[in-house]
Image: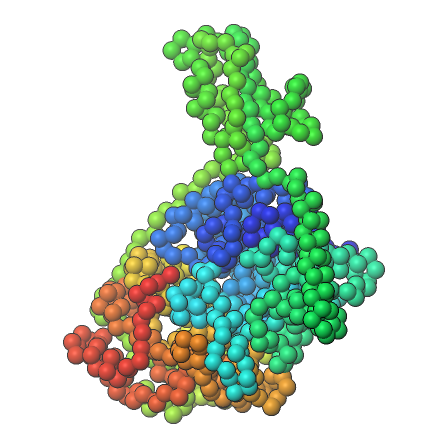
Amino acid sequence: MSRKIELLAPGGDVEAIKAAIVAGASAVYCGLDTLNARNRATNLSFDDLTGVLRLAHKYDCEVFLTLNVVILEQELPSIIKLLNKLVNSGIDGIIVQDLGMFNLVKKFFPTLDIHASTQLTTLNEGQIRFLNKIGASRVNLSRELNIGEIASLTKLSHELGILTEVFVHGALCIAFSGQCYSSSVSVGNSGNRGRCSQACRDEYEVTATGNRHPLNLKDNSAYFDLPELVEAGVDSLKIEGRIKGAHYVYTVVDTWRKQINQFVETGELLPDDSNLHKVFNRDFTNSFLKGNLTKDMFIDNPRDHSVKHTVDSSGAISVVQIQQVTDELYSDRTQLGTELGEKIQYLSTAKLPLKIEFSGSLNTPLNITVIVGADIEGNDDSEGSNSEDAKVINLHSKTLLALAGKSEINEEILTKRFRSFDNAEFNLTEFSFADFDSGLSVPFKELVSLKKQLAFLLNNSAEVIPNVDVPALSKKNRASGKPSMSILIADEKDFHLCDLTDADVYFKIPESLKKNCTKHIELLKANPRLIPWFPAVLIGKDYLEAVKILEQVQPKRIVSNNTGIAYKAYEMDIEWIAGPFLNTTNSYALLTLKEELNCAGAFISNEINRLQIRNIARPDNFKMLYSIYHPILMMTSRQCFFQQTVGCKKPSIEDGCMLKCEKATTITNVKGISFAIDKQKGGYPSIYNDEQFLNLEVVNDLSGLFDEFFIDLTNIGAGSKAEQDKTLLIKHFENLLQGNEHAAAQLNEVINVSTNAQYRQGL
């Protein structure tokens, strides 16, 4: 087999990256100390990153930097400053979640390669086309996809010149990545900001099925599925684990490297995965990849399973036998740790020492000798010469040194001009002027030219890209008048609400649609006032059926929480609004949507607060919307939340489950807080907060910014709560937006279990 298969390893700190390199990783992904989705990892400083790049490239290993969080408006100057540094760093790619990053990079930093993060929830072909349009060169496909779905999306990606990567080992989230708000809602630590508190690993009150950890999945391992992944055309096999240590990374990467090499060389697989069980794991499953979503995916213990696996597989029974087997496991770990230590002890990411020598006399050129690395004696006159320990660069001015007059080139001037080379990559240890005569000068432009030549050579013979000044975007309020109201419904029995209000009425399309069923097409055609509202998750035939709705109804306007449907609307020249689950938090995200896909407006994320919202700048002819009342979604899953709670007779999820099941239950955590598990017909199992989101403050705070305030009148996520009087709610909300001073009190009385904590705390 000639095709390269990339093995992509996690690097939570420098030691883990070294471990990945010596274990045979083709590439590593790592994060800086901010703006990445693993804030609990040690992460790197920029100086660390520079050293890592030099070390990794020496061993033909690429480095990708994770910037995979949503970006806040006030962080844009810092992001721009970082991107200006990254363009000259040699980084091989940046991993991005925020849509605004695509606009910034494509316009101002086009040499950077953009990889679409798993946080972008990429599940259908329209999303691949969307990401291709905005500038992605690689896409991390969602972990919930099966091998057939992966193969189909990879085929399309390759036709568009995009690479695909798939997680093949490590922790599994039960929720769709990018669509989990449980940590944000519960404790104010957003997964979209890299601060997930892992509610899916939490302990809950014992469920009817006897489980204390009903949301906890086993770890992912596709170790024996390598042939299917290769057949599917996947370009990169990605290992999860940036909060794991070097020992874990070394063991897993080494084991996977041996498996890949064996398969490439012989077409056969190694049968032994025992080393994967010797480091942290929660036992393993490949059920998402196989498309077989059984109860066996769960494990009722989120802690390390390695000791239990070792004991169980050994057949040890007595206390003595169990202790002996456990001791052997720890001995093996120690041996692996020793092996790793020996392999990485001489790998250095320290800055390279740099010495700059100036020499010259009257009527000779100004000579600059630069020694990079260990000092050595002797060099030649070529532009760059290398030894095992050092690199020597010689530069000469084109103009001969002349008597200075008033423009003497002295030590102070030369030091000031060249001291910028003491930076993230080099430690400028010494300036030498021993052989440089005083009282001389060369034209100033010669110094500029010499410095530019040196920068080029020290930058691996690549032109140094100058800093880009990104213009500030001007904030614009709504043109005039008061913001309008919109409502969302999901049931035909609520159609009468259209007669009670002038508000825009959105109609929620379910996540799953029966193949070739025309129900929603006929419904929307018969009720042209309804504006289709498309969900965030659409996979396979459900995406294709949703596209049919667009094609056959051809509505004048839609709201889409799915970028695949958004792309299709753009192709069909249908006006579309970006829904709240696209996690829009900054001005450049709005620009991406407007400029690349002709988006007409966007909901601003409900995760951010007043101060984080107020300076967002809208593009021209672009609407800004905000939801002031809705059930608070915590997570949505392709797995079943009922298998480990109330139980289900079916051994695995099947197509009919999505279309027919409408169970509901609650789970209660050890603090006594309950959460509604809701399964609508045609919907994915979802968990909702006990409180509704009700934000009346924003109407007073930011009415001048928003064109439309939205209220969700579906019954989704209500759990066991009594259904609200929707007619009364519409009346109260309309009064609120008209400035009625009593409306807020009336709403708080009617909606008595509510919160706007996210708006107050922000990200």
Looking at the image, which is closer to me, 671 or 199?
671
Q: Quadrant of residue 404?
A: top left
Q: Is residue 644 above or below residue 374?
A: below
Which residue does the image show at 39% across and 51% down from the upper left? 76
| Quadrant of the drawing holding the N terminus | bottom right
Which residue does the image show at 44% across and 77% down from the upper left? 669
Left or right of residue 715: residue 335: right
Image position, residue 408 (x, y; %): 42, 13
Residue at the extreme right = 266
Which residue does the image show at 62% across and 76% down from the upper left? 297
Q: Is residue 548 visible?
A: no
Q: Quadrant of residue 755?
A: bottom left
Left or right of residue 588: residue 244: right
Residue at the extreme front = 320
| Quadrant of the drawing holding the C terminus | bottom left
Image position, residue 327 (x, y; %): 70, 61
Q: Is residue 344 above or below residue 330?
A: above
Which residue does the image show at 38% across and 11% down from the upper left? 406
